[in-house]
Image (cartoon, helix red, strand yellow):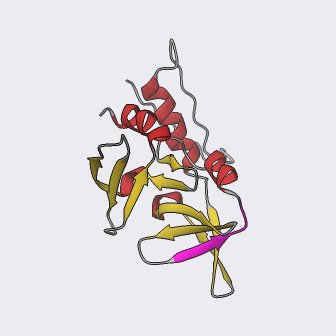
Amino acid sequence: MKIHIIQDDRADEPEVTITCREITEDIQRAITAIRAINCTLTGVREGQTFILQPAEVVYIDTADKRTFIYTAGDVYETPLRLYELEQQLPNADFFRANKSCIIGMRHIRSIKADIDGRLLLTMDSGEKLWVSRQYAAEFRRKIGM
């Protein structure tokens, strides 16, 4: 892979051009990573709205028709529904674990398979989250397990 960087004082904003014979999985991951640079989320805590970077998000969960964003140290509420957040977030970094939860892939510490086909994830924060049977095969494929 060749990387060319052209510094131009007349450029209004950065521009990325990818020239390839075909779009491979590696190229798709690079595109996703580039798009993630401009992706931000907002969450409300104690009456204040905070801007969150996707890299900060450990997981997102719903309870009682409310959606919560969990970071390493805080919990924020968001008005967005889970499917809306799933569409916004970079596919390479996030995964739907079950009906009510999206996980941040970079915050997974360990994975344990359960007898019934589910997976138990231990996150960096020590929190344990389940990947349901419905999503387990896709999760295994995504991480090469």
**Quadrant for the C terminus in the image:** top left
Q: Please give the name of the residue rendered at 52% of the width and 19% of the height, measured from the top-left corner.
A: 23
Extreme residue in the front direction: 116
> In the picture shown, does residue 6 fall above or below 68?
above
Q: Position of residue 135 (x, y in %)?
A: 48, 40
> In the picture shown, does residue 143 fall above or below 99?
above
Q: Position of residue 78 (x, y in %)?
A: 67, 68
Q: Please give the name of the residue rendered at 50% of the width and 38% of the height, measured from the top-left corner.
A: 134
**Quadrant for the N terminus in the image:** top left
Residue 122 is left or right of residue 26, and the answer is left
Q: Please give the name of the residue rendered at 60% of the width and 44% of the height, measured from the top-left corner.
A: 14
Image quadrant in which you'd find residue 67: bottom right
Magenta span of residues: 75-80
Extreme residue in the top direction: 21
> In the picture shown, does residue 41 fall above or below 120?
below
Q: Tell me if residue 78 is in the magenta stretch.
A: yes
Residue 65 is left or right of residue 39, and the answer is right
Q: Position of residue 13 (x, y in %)?
A: 65, 47
Q: Nearer the viewer, residue 43 or 114?
A: 114
Q: Tell me if residue 65 is in the magenta stretch.
A: no
Q: Is residue 14 visible?
A: yes
Residue 48 is left or right of residue 135, and the answer is right
Residue 118 is left or right of residue 52, and the answer is left
Q: Position of residue 34 (x, y in %)?
A: 53, 42
Q: Is residue 7 visible?
A: no
Extreme residue in the bottom direction: 46
> What type of secondary structure mainly makes up the magenta span?
strand
Image quadrant in which you'd find residue 136: top left
